[in-house]
Amino acid sequence: MWKGLIHFWKSDNLLKQALDQSFEMLDIDYEMFQAAVKSLRHTDMGVDDATRAKDKIVNKYEREVRRKVITHLSVSGTSDLPAGLVLTTIIIDIERIGDYIKNILDLASLHVPKLQVGNLIDQLVHVEESVDDMFAKSITCFKKSDEALALKLMAETRTIGKTCDEMIEKLIKDEHPSLAPGDAVAMALYLRYLKRINAHLRNITSSIVNPFDRIGFKYKKKA
């Protein structure tokens, strides 16, 4: 379904513009994500205004994509409805990723100096690197309509989500008493945001292999 829609979108100027903007939205999200992680975990400088401003660009693009899709559908009729529905569904996930990244930026502004996590550093770095890798590969998967990569990434996102849940549970149960209360709270929130970013990336990659009604759900082989 996805490859057919990509071919269809690229054949229409208005939908091609909308598709290109959705690609750019995801690229901007990734830039914001890396800056947000750096602000929270690797610097004591807080958050720069330029990074925050990128979220407004993502929101602007989301509105523009919606307008272009609805304008196209008003002319072409219901025959192009599946293509429009898929694209508008995907950009919701892209916009939500931006919101969770903004949450990390807010956390970085509150938690100055940088977040210290003691002996949990190796586990946290593993999660951060896994989500970063998922981000980069999801962008490639989305742009190239790579079905094999999509299936691989969907399996990996489940592992990342489970790891985040396990770490959050231990923080809530106070199994890391050496952490300062503020650091423990910040880390629990941070892990939650990373988990949700990961989940929305999974939704996007699922659109490569799933029909419209199963976007965001587990891949189900055709009977």
Image (cartoon, helix red, strand yellow):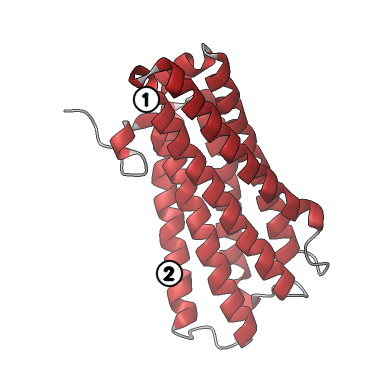
At which x and y percent is residue 158?
39, 52
Q: In the picture provided, is 203 more to the left or to the right than 26? A: left
* CB contact under 8 Å: marks 2 and 1: no
Q: Secondary structure at mark 1?
A: helix
User: Is 32 above or below relative to 82?
Assistant: below
Q: Secondary structure at mark 2?
A: helix
Residue for point 61% across, 63% down: 103
Q: Is residue 76 left or right of residue 36?
A: left
User: Is residue 143 placed above or below 190 in the rendered structure?
Assistant: above
Rendered location of residue 1, percent (x, y): 35, 22
Indicate which disc residue 199 carries: none
Quadrant containing the C terminus in the rendered view:
top left
The furthest residue to the right: 45
Rendered location of residue 146, percent (x, y):
47, 26
Mark 1 — residue?
81
- Which of the two discs, 2 and 1, labels the residue nearer the N terminus? 1
Furthest residue toward front = 74
Q: Mark 2 against mark 1, which lies toward the viewer?
A: 1
Q: Residues within 10 Å of mark 2 (few under 14, many from 20)?
A: few
Is residue 200 shown to the viewer in this render? yes
State the residue position of label 2: 166
Residue 130 drawn above or below residue 20 = below
- Residue found 54% across the figure and 62% down from its top: 193
Query: Residue placed at 73% from the left, 70% from the top?
Result: 109
Q: CA distance from mark 2 to mark 1?
A: 41 Å
Residue 211 pos. (x, y %): 31, 31
**Type of the residue with mark 2:** Glu
Q: Is residue 179 visible?
A: no
Q: Residue furthest left?
A: 223
Q: Amino acid at mark 1?
A: Leu
